[in-house]
Amino acid sequence: MAADLDPRVRLATALESQPGVYALLVGSGVSTGAGVPTGWGVVDSLVRRIAVASGETLAPNFDAETWWTANGDGKPLGYSSILERLGQTRAARRALLAGFFEPSDEDRENELKVPSAAHRAIAQLVRSGFIRVIVTTNFDHLLERAIEAEGVSVQVISTDSAIAGMEPLQHMQCTIVKLHGDYTNLDQRNTVDELSAYPKSTKSLLGRIFDEYGLIISGWSGEWDPALVRALEANANRRYPLFWVAKSAPGEVAKRVLSRSGAVLVEGTTADEIFPDLLERVHALESMAASPDSTNMALARLKKALPDPPRHIEVRELFEAELRKLSAFTAELVATGQPADWEAVEAGLASLRDQSATLIQLYTTGIYLDRDRQHTELWVQVLQRSMAIRRSDTISAWWSRYLHYPALLMMRAATEAALLAGHEDVARRIMQEATWATPREDSGRARPAWAVLHPWTVTEHDQLNKLPRAGGRKWVYPASRFVREDLADLVAPILGDEDYDLLHKRAEYRAALAYEFGKTAETWDQPLSGEYVGEQMWTWGNEREPLMAVDFRERGDRAAWGLRDDNESEFNQHIADLNEVLRSYPRYF
């Protein structure tokens, strides 16, 4: 008989094939490995402190609950009741608890009370878009710290009242629901009564999560959380699978939930073991998905879904998946630091091009086949998302700018595809409406793609000529040449009989037009330069204007730029103004 498939394989395959569909339910077993006590562990320790301070000698069989019943204030033993007795103010209570949850210098040296291997792996899964929702019974901040360290903003829900004002789960990159509260307030749940029932708002939120998402459980036994167990059992007929990770054999409660839900048990592993392993397996599957066959499959899906309104969500998901992969790769590239030499710079640019190849092919094919312009808003959003992948505050300024190279390729390819489709208006909208705000430059003002993705902004002219692929030549417009060469194969499937070199020059001229028609009094950018300006004398038909200006007069869509056919003077003035700037650019070898 064939052996059953390893549940780790099933889990990794499920997660990679449906990014964002699975939520996590994590308990104390995820944080105890980092040296953080459970909520009950804190309560027990505080009772012991009170007993010692009261003059008692602790017996080996000391029982906190028995002692509290005999010597406490008459309230049930719990986090809140003890803190109210020991700390009169919020600041005093926080200081009292800090030692349990905040690392000392010694803790940091011993890697205690800091994000563990499990927290860090979960954070990377969040950054890559595989996990978006986390439900936890833990009081600590380790998950938030690990996820924020990956550059992801986290929505944290730690009180019942916060549920009413929360952003929808599907709109957030990450939401953490802290069912038992946060150690910095007194709203924690830890007594038997508190854990027996949840308020209506919490039950409703859990019901949605357990119904709409697959679930991965780790570090939680279910023995002490009856209300949470009931919420799980209420959704036993799940639309997505449940995976339960356990270090040892499951207890009675876990067995009951497993049997009712048909869950997959991943046994004999800790959180610090399973999540790094899961991350590695998912990355391996992603690498496999980057094959030419997978690109062809994605293109086939796009072509079928694009004209079919019920499948438009599938179109969006195709681009979301590729953007997540590019974002994860870029983050890893940033982690390696600034390239040490020109060979490393060239390798980095090549890897950015290769990692975005499927995304660019989907993008150009989608724009070219979008005959009724049903998806123009999506095309704008995809370019904007690609620009947002650059994190300008993570590495040196000059190498950080190169992280916009995939977006530059996409904008140029999008313009070429729109021109081939006869949708010049779509090209202008993409270049004008997709924006990016530079956090540390230009006062954070959002600028349009035609300005953000100007080759002078993304690349360094002299650096490009030092790359091995330049072959020692001093190109006048190296960025223009490199972009053309990097896109030729990616645009080829929709090119037909068109001359690609001519198409590329036409697209570059449209980028210059975007400047001319989008400039304001505050605009400091210059119109796009490039090979269309002319590295050889014959590129200009005469001394009055470049051939691409003549081409635009004959083939351009004036309406796409807000020009009326009967307003020849306005048209001529715009062309003349642009020509005046272009005439100052180098035209010869």
Image: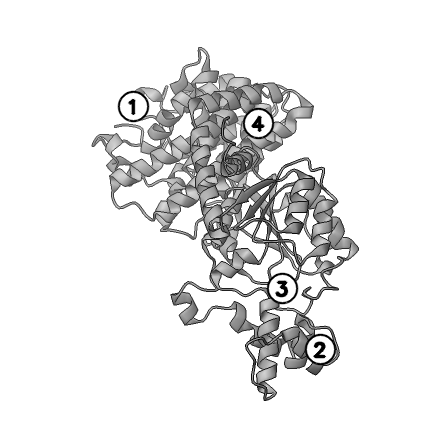
Image disc number at residue 426: 4
Q: Give x and y (percent) for residue 126.
A: 53, 46
Q: Are marks 2 and 3 in contact (CB under 8 Å)?
A: no
The disc at residue 69 is: 2
Label 2 or label 3, whichever comes before in sequence order: 2
Q: Position of residue 160 (x, y in %)?
A: 72, 59
> What colouring method underlies this structural image?
one colour
Q: Secondary structure at mark 1?
A: loop
Q: Are marks 2 and 1 in contact (CB under 8 Å)?
A: no
Task: Tell me which amino acid carries mark 4.
Answer: Val
Percent coordinates x, y for residue 397 in the rendering: 37, 50
Most extreme residue toward the left is 472
Residue located 42% across and 63% down the image: 111
Q: Amino acid at mark 3?
A: Asp
Using the rendered view, name the quadrant where residue 435 is placed. Answer: top right
Residue wearing tag 3:
182
- Mark 3 burial class by Cα count in 10 Å: few <14, some 14-19, many 20+: many
Which numbered tag is attached to residue 286? none
Q: Secondary structure at mark 2?
A: helix
- How far apart marks 2 and 3 lie (CA) works out to 25 Å
Q: Earlier in the sequence, mark 3 or mark 1?
A: 3
Of badges 2 and 1, the one in the foreground is: 2
- Distance between the alpha carbons at the discs numbered 3 and 1: 68 Å
Mark 3 and mark 4 lie on one chain; the one further toward the N terminus is 3
Disc 1 marks a residue whose amino acid type is Gln
Locate residue 227 relative to residue 330 in the image: left or right. right
Can I make out residue 449 in this image? Answer: no
Q: Is residue 191 left or right of residue 219?
A: right
Disc 4 packing (10 Å; few <14; some 14–19; many ≥20): many
Mark 2–mark 1 distance (CA, rounded to whole Å): 93 Å
Q: Is residue 525 above or below residue 505?
A: below
